[in-house]
Every structure is written in C-alpha cells, then in structure tokens.
C-alpha cells in the first residue's frame, strides 16, 4: 500500500488526478444530460411514471420508492421527461461523493482512484433511465457508506451507534426500492458472523432500524393480494431451469461491467486483490458475497445487468485499493479508452436519421417511440377508449397522452399494475380501440364486443393497427379474461394472511375468490 501523502493538493498536482476527476465528471454529466433530454421515454420508464402519478405504499411488481421519487420530481420540477430522469443523471456524482467520503479516511489517494474508476465505467456515461434500480443503488451505497464509517471507529461511542442506526435505516429504504436489498442484508450478516461477532449488538441495532421498510411492505402486500410476493417468488420464476449458457453470460456481463482492462488486471493482480480483501474485509464482503449469490442464481436464471449495480461502485473501490501504484494510471487509461468507444458509438447513433433504421427489425418500435403523438393522433376518436395489447406500448401511449391506457387481454406475468388500477366494468357498452403493431386476429376479440373491425394505419412507412370493438361486453370479458388471470396470477397460498385484494374484490366481491 502506498504511503499517505502529507497533502492531498500536492498529490493531485503530482499525478494530475484532480484534472482527471473534473474532466471525467463534467464530460460524463454533460453526456447524460444530453441523452436524458433527447432520448424518448422507454416502456419501463413510462410504466414507472404512473407509479409517480398514483403514489402508494407499493405496486404490483415492486416496493414503492421509485414511485415516490418520480412523484417528488414531478412536484418539484414539473411533469417532464428530463425532470423524472434527473435523479439517475445525478446519481454517479452522488455515488462518487459517497465513495470519497467513505474511503478517504483509509487512504485519500486510493479513494480518489476509486471514484475515477467508477466514473470511467461506460454505464456511468450512458445510463439515464429512471427505474427501480435508481433508488436501490443510492440507498444501498449510502447504507454501506455508513457501515464502513462505523466500522472505522475503534470505540462504540455515540457517533458509532448513530452510524450503525443510519446504515440500518438506509437498508430499509433500499428494501422499499427493490427486493435485491435482501442481498445486502445477507452480506451484512455474513460479515458480522465471520469477522465482527464482538459487535453483534451494533448489528442488532442495524437490523432493528431496517425493519420499518419490510414492515411497510408486508402491510401493503397483505392488503393487495401479496402481489409483490406472487410476482417475485412465484410467477416470474416458473420454468426456470439450469443451462450452461446462463453462468457463462453472467461471467461475460461482469467482464463488461468491470471493463476489459479492469477485468484483466483483476486476474493478473489476483494476489494483490486477495491481500487487499484481507485488509478491507467489509469492502471485500460487499463485493464478493453478492457476486457469489448471483453466481449461484445464474445456474437457473439469466442474471440481469442491473441486478448487481447496488454493489458495483465497491468493486472499483476494492480494485483501487489492490492495484500496485504503477498500475493505477494504466487501468484508468484503458477504462477511458473503453468509455470513449461507447461515446463514439452513441455519437454515431445520434448522427443517423430514422430512415437509416428502415431495414432494422427494431424500426417499428423506434417509430413507436419517436412518433408516438403522430400515431395516437391517427387512432384517437371522440368517445373512443384507447387500449393496447401489452404494457410497454400501453405505458408509452399513456405517457404521451398523460392519460392512463389499460392493457386489453391477459397481458404477461410482469407489469400487472392494471390489476390494481383498472375497473373494466366502466367500459361496459363503450367503443374501444386496441392499438397493435402486428396484424390482429379478429376472432380473439369478437367474444367481448357486439361488433369488431380492424383499422389500418401507417406512420413513417410502418403499418400499425387498431382493433375497434363496439359495445364492450364486460360480463364476457370477466369470464373469458379476468377469471383466467385470477387462476394464473392470484393463486395465493392459503397460509398467507390477507386483508385485501383489489383485483379479487372487483372480480368476485371477496378477498379470496373461490377456485
């Protein structure tokens, strides 16, 4: 480990690290701002947008934090795309500041390199999409930061107890963001059991302070048909089976997230990395325990790139503390080149017009995203209710209209917020147009309307369709669509206590419908 310099200013002047940090921080921020303003809303973002329009203690798929965040941004800055994306645009700066605050008491030099490595990761140049991961990452890193600072205190004084309590509180906030916060809780458990049994009392305080988050979530699930549990533990995991490509994809994903040069140095300097891990045990646990957890999960599931992002910053921190002094700059240069390639690719994409994508299979989806208002202007008609065939287009159309657009039909196992929000009985006897990008089959809709016809439209050369159904028959829809939805997605275990279930109550007037 390098000697600590007498002055951080002298160190910055000697190696130009300050210039690196300022340049990378400002350039990446500028790119994120540009993308956030110019890139159209995505399906997931538009879906979460409605969580911000209808704030609640929870939602079908996940806990409520991103909905609260979007609601706050809409209230503070207005109902615009850039406003709801602002938290994720600023997130890398906040995380870099937390890394510095957490690690500089250990070694100012290595802490600065840790921030630089993290900011050089291409993901921190390009990601401007507001999702459930945005608050999860922030609260998780904040919780770890508090714990790392608490563990630095040799005596259990008032400050130490406060830091442990704050770490637990922020862990509870992470849980209210996404269930992957459980992995952080597991990490803390492993660390205290293996290395800090002398501070199990502090760990107990941390756990107690985290409990309000799960308590809120349990209360919400009891009153909403355990929708989070049914989705995350049951419905989304049906059919999961072992395949060799899944762990290989996981390893490839980690190599990409780390960047090739950093991944190579991890392998070449594995001895130094092991030594640093022994010196920084909590930091090592925050990196290695989640990686091992997701490695086991990858045997049956394809691990999403975003699943590991709560622990992502600390991987670069561990690398910065492990690499020999002479390798730090070469690692940063390699990462900068890799980030630069991504920036050039983005510039190239922005330099293309919509017509350049005509031969790409994604062209219909691109037109739907960039020409949403023009498409809706063609389909809309007085007295006609607009719907869509899946949650992604429904969310995008609804965002453009600033009017909730339901999904007509059974939908999928995820994004079933309609089950909580939409009462299809209000459409009884009305005319409905279901927008589709593919040619619909009329016979699939005929049982639910008195008459059905298919309308054909085109936008920028892309055909799209609307199934116009007149005289909506709610009773038939209830029997043919809603009842199968209940059997498919609301097979709630009898041992789970329930105080409410909005979907069930609309369907049969009871908290649990008879099978």
Image (cartoon, rainbow, N blue to C red):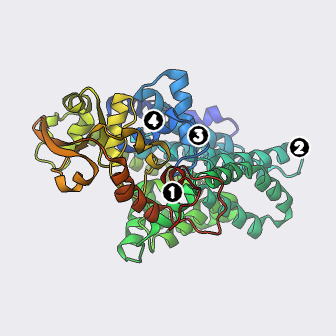
N-term-proximal mark, 4 vs 3: 4
Q: Secondary structure at mark 1?
A: helix
- Res. 56 mark: 3
Q: Earlier in the sequence, mark 2 or mark 4?
A: 4
Depth-wise, is mark 2 or mark 4 nearer the camera?
2
Tell us which disc is closer to us: 4 or 1. Answer: 1
First of labels 1, 2 by sequence position: 2
| Labels 1 and 3: the sequence-earlier one | 3
Q: Report the residue marked by disc 2.
A: 158
Q: Which mark is residue 449?
A: none
- Residue under circle 1? 308
Residue on which the image places disc 4: 24
Q: Are marks 2 and 3 in contact (CB under 8 Å)?
A: no
- Let me know if residue 451 appears in the view: yes
Residue 273 located left or right of residue 124? right
Q: List x then y, in percent, for residue 118.
A: 50, 46
Left or right of 380 in this view: 205: right
Residue at (67% x, 59% y) in the render = 185
Q: Nearer the viewer, residue 191 or 214?
A: 214
Please report whichever mark, 2 or 3, sits nearer to the chain's N-terminal start. Answer: 3
Tell me the element at label 4: helix
On the image, the x and y values in percent for residue 289 come to 60, 65
- Which residue is rendered at x = 68% and y = 48% of the image? 216
Depth order, front residue of 496/104: 496
């Amino acid at each position: 480990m390098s000697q600590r310099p007498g002055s951080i200013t002298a160190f910055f002047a000697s190696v130009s690290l300050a210039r690196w940090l300022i340049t990378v921080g400002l350039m990446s921020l500028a790119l994120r701002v540009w993308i956030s303003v110019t890139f159209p809303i995505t399906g997931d973002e538009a879906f979460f947008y409605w969580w911000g329009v209808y704030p609640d203690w929870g939602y079908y798929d996940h806990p409520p934090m991103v909905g609260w965040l979007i609601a706050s941004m809409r209230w503070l800055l207005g109902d615009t795309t850039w406003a709801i994306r602002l938290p994720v645009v600023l997130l890398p700066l906040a995380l870099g500041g937390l890394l510095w605050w957490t690690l500089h008491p250990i070694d100012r030099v290595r802490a600065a390199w840790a921030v630089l490595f993290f900011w050089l990761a291409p993901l921190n140049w390009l990601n401007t999409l507001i999702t459930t991961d945005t608050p999860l990452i922030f609260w998780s890193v904040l919780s770890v930061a508090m714990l790392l600072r608490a563990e630095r205190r040799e005596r259990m004084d008032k400050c130490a107890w406060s830091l442990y309590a704050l770490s637990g509180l922020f862990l509870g906030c992470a849980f209210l963001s996404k269930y992957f916060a459980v992995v952080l809780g597991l990490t803390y458990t492993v660390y205290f059991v293996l290395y800090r049994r002398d501070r199990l009392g502090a760990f107990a305080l941390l756990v107690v302070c985290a409990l309000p988050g799960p308590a809120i979530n349990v209360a919400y699930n009891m009153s909403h048909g355990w929708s989070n549990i049914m989705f995350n533990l049951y419905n989304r995991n049906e059919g999961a089976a072992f395949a060799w490509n899944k762990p290989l994809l996981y390893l490839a994903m980690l190599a990409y997230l780390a960047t090739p040069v950093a991944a190579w140095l991890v392998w070449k300097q594995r001895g130094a990395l092991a030594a640093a891990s022994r010196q920084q045990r909590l930091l090592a646990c925050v990196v290695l325990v989640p990686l091992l957890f997701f490695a086991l999960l990858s045997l049956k599931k394809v691990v999403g790139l975003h699943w590991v992002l709560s622990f992502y910053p600390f991987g670069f921190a561990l690398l910065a503390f492990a690499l020999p002094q002479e390798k730090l700059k070469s690692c940063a240069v390699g990462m900068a080149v890799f980030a630069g390639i991504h920036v050039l690719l983005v510039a190239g994409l922005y330099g293309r017009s919509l017509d350049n994508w005509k031969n790409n299979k994604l062209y219909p989806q691109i037109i739907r995203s960039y020409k949403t208002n023009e498409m809706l202007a063609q389909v809309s008609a007085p007295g006609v209710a607009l719907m869509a065939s899946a949650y992604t287009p429904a969310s995008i159309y609804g965002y453009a209209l600033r009017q909730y657009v339901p999904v007509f039909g059974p939908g999928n196992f995820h994004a079933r917020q309609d089950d909580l929000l939409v009462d299809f009985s209000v459409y009884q006897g009305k005319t409905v147009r279901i927008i589709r990008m593919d040619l619909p089959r009329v016979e699939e809709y005929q049982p639910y309307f008195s008459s059905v016809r298919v309308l054909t439209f085109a936008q920028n050369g892309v055909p799209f369709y609307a199934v116009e159904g007149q005289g909506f028959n709610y009773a038939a829809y209830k029997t043919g669509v809603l009842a199968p939805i209940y059997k498919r997605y609301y097979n709630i275990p009898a041992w789970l206590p329930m105080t409410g279930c909005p979907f069930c109550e609309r369907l049969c007037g009871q908290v649990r419908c008879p099978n």
